[in-house]
Amino acid sequence: MVAAPRTFEVRISGRQENDAAVITRRNVIRLAGSGVIGLAAGCSLPATARREPAGDAVTNAFLDDVQRRTFRYFWETTNPVNGLAHDRFPTKSFASMAAVGFALTAYPIGVHRGFVSRQAAANRTLATLRFLANAPQGDAPAGMTGHKGFFYHFVDMERGTRFEQTELSTVDTALLLGGMLFAQSYFDKPGEAEIRALVDQIYARVDWQWSQARPPTVALGWSPEKGHLPYDWIAYSEAMLVYILALGSPTHSLGPESWGAWAAGLPKHWGTEEGQQLVRFAPLFGHQYSHIWVDFRGIQDPFMRSKGLDYFENSRRATIAQRAYAVRNPMGWKGYGPRLWGLTACDGPADVTVDVDGRSRTFRSYSARGPGDFDDGTVAPTAVGGSVPFAPELCIPALVAMRADHGEHLYGQYGFLDSLNLTIPPSVPLKHGKHVPGRGWYDGDYLGIDQGPILAMIENHRSGLVWRLMRSNPHIRQGLERAGFAGGWLAS
């Protein structure tokens, strides 16, 4: 039985600034002993393994373990023949193109941390890129991996072709390309030239101009059955990366007016959350995804210049606000506080409304969650793990507490399982996971799009590896400059 595609309601802006619509989009992701299970073949610790500088040995050991386990999720569960990554695991599922982007990001981090040899990582990367470069593209409703250079959101794990009637996704293609461009920047040796060439080939064929059903903005996606989806990427969201890559394209680039159209919706999202002034987006993934590959510290577009801050600071404020919301706990969910917080898109226990202690409570399975949007008491470790660089003094203690408080129910072979909910009654039939008597509900799956931010953003906090290499990527730099970003590292 293959898991059903993830669906949830997400409130985004339509093409016009005042055209808000609620749509359904398939997207948007303990130390049980002192030892760690040995890595798969090709993962022995090289003699040149990177070592963390002297510091808090306990914290470094914890972060080492989280990163090692999370890396192993991508190394051990992806298809080694074609590089495709599961949407979720261990539940049998299709592949997620965004998860492939996170896998491609994970491999160089694994080399940097000494979890895998450079040659093994390069081989896996090359297998992935060769498959994607040669996979069928076209407008047929079946048997294709993508169209016009874009990729379908979900594909079959073995064949790599469209899963059921999933959409061709502009944002999932962008997340895939983010991983590719990082791999291109990392694998810079003479013997790794094919990796760099394949990334150039795949990126160059993406027809961003075709994706503009309603110029100058970019549509969320397309399907053979209905054509372009009737909604565009406008206002603050994970789609920053979509526009940066579209503006930086060497072949089908969009004009600066596209970023201007996206940014036109920012003022209405500016406000105050838990005492923090910021551009608001309720689930934390919107404050994380683009930041995985783009270092927004010190660089500003016109809107951020007008506010005297940058998007990194905006994400820091969003992280602080989420923790403050959990501490205040206005809805009275069990467990919320400084040791358990973080709302984003994630698995949930069930789609049901039930009475809990005399109060009607609505729970969801997979859904976007965030303060002021939807909150059913479900917390996702990725919300905290993916925000580590923004507020390490808040996020790292929370991750340590989650592992200590919930042990093997939440922290397992591949790091943090996707989510938990301590409020839902044990009598409720579940869609995911399990009830643990005396504790609450815990998910049984790891999700690729939620594992990826944990690994990458902890690395950005510890060494800045992804940010440092991507600052020198000419496509990223061009996209940012054409969008009107200036200052900081762009000035050098």
Image: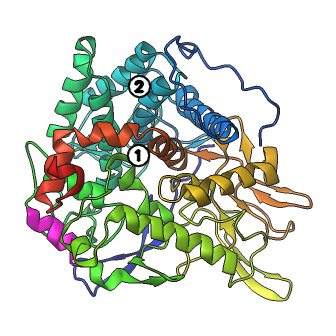
Q: Amino acid at mark 2?
A: Asn
Range of the magenta residues? 256-265
Mark 2 neighbour density, 10 Å: few (under 14) some (14–19) many (20 or more):
many
Q: Which residue is mark 2?
A: 82
Above or below — where is 53 with respect to 478? above
Locate residue 344: give its quadrant.
bottom right
Q: Is residue 221 visible?
A: no
Q: Residue furthest right?
A: 438
Mark 1 neighbour density, 10 Å: few (under 14) some (14–19) many (20 or more):
many
Q: How is the image coloured?
A: rainbow
Instruction: Confirm whether the magenta stretch covers residue 422.
Output: no
Q: Nearer the viewer, residue 211 or 316?
A: 316
Q: Is residue 434 left or right of residue 203?
A: right
Residue at 43% over, 57% down? 288
Magenta-drawn stretch, dominant element (helix, strand or loop): helix
Sequence-wise, which precedes: disc 1 or disc 2?
A: 2
Q: Nearer the viewer, residue 403 or 434?
A: 403
Residue 98: mark: 1
Residue at 23% over, 55% down? 488
Q: Element at badge 1?
A: helix
Q: For the image shown, how many numbered marks are present on the structure? A: 2
Residue 55: mark: none
Image location of residue 475, percent across then percent down = 17, 43
